Image (cartoon, grey):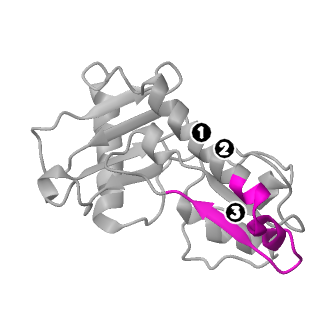
Amino acid sequence: MNVRIRGLLEKNAKSIISHVKKSHLQKKSFSSSGFFQVSVPHGEHIYDYLIRTPLIISYPPLFPAKTIIDQFEQIDILPTILGALEIDSPEDIDGRNFYNLIKGGTQIPSRPAYLECTYTQHRPEKNQWLIGLRTNREKFIFAPFNNEIAPELYNLEQDPEEEENIADRSRKKAERYREIALKYFSRGNEEKTEL
């Protein structure tokens, strides 16, 4: 991702936080009965600069000011809020409870996040859809209905901008990621597969 785009994204995230701090939303979110959440959805692809979006939750009695850099998925929001309220999550929920980490506890074991870009105005046809997996170290992207679109594999530690596709050099790993992503795609988010 180029520096200009990253700067715009960071500026927008800072703008949201600044607006919340200055506006009436802050007063509401800091009241004993208030709850405020902001989430920004991804766009037409599943590159990190589009999918790594800010999530802001403000309710100081339960959520202290903290920045979490661990991979956090939308499906983790409900179990985390339930954890904060000391309510057990139903067994059929795939998300994980990050509340202990938010309160300063131990890190949660990493697992791959399933990604998809389907049914959007930019990708209405199945042959344009993209799915993939993201771990803390790597990202794999492919088109499940179109072999003409080359699969993409990135080492996020060495290439956080996702500029060097290493899928051709790491075919076995790419194929393993493909199999796991197809399981998610075919059956929904059943049990997560460890890598």
At label 1, which amino acid type do we have? Lys
**Quadrant hosting residue 74:** bottom right
Q: Secondary structure at mark 3?
A: loop
Q: Mark 3 or mark 1, which is nearer the start of the sequence?
A: 1
* The disc label shown at residue 32, or none: none
Where's residue 166, x and y in %?
32, 22
Whether pointer 2 and pointer 1 mark residues with C-beta atoms closer than 8 Å, the reply is yes
Q: Which residue is mark 3?
A: 97
> Residue furthest toward the front?
23
Q: Residue at x 64, y 47 (%)?
A: 15
Label 1 Cα neighbours within 10 Å, binned few <14 / some 14-19 / many ≥20: few
In the displayed structure, does residue 154 sit left or right of residue 81?
Answer: left
Q: Residue at x 48, y 50 (%)?
A: 113
| Nearer to the camera, 4 or 168 | 4
Q: Residue at x 60, y 50 (%)?
A: 54
Judged by depth in the image, the label closer to the viewer, 3 or 2, is: 2
At label 2, which amino acid type do we have? Lys
Q: Which residue is mark 1?
A: 11
Label 3 to label 2: alpha-carbon separation: 26 Å
Q: Which residue is mark 2?
A: 14
| Range of residues picked out in magenta | 19-40
| Nearer to the camera, 90 or 24 | 24
**Quadrant hosting residue 26:** bottom right
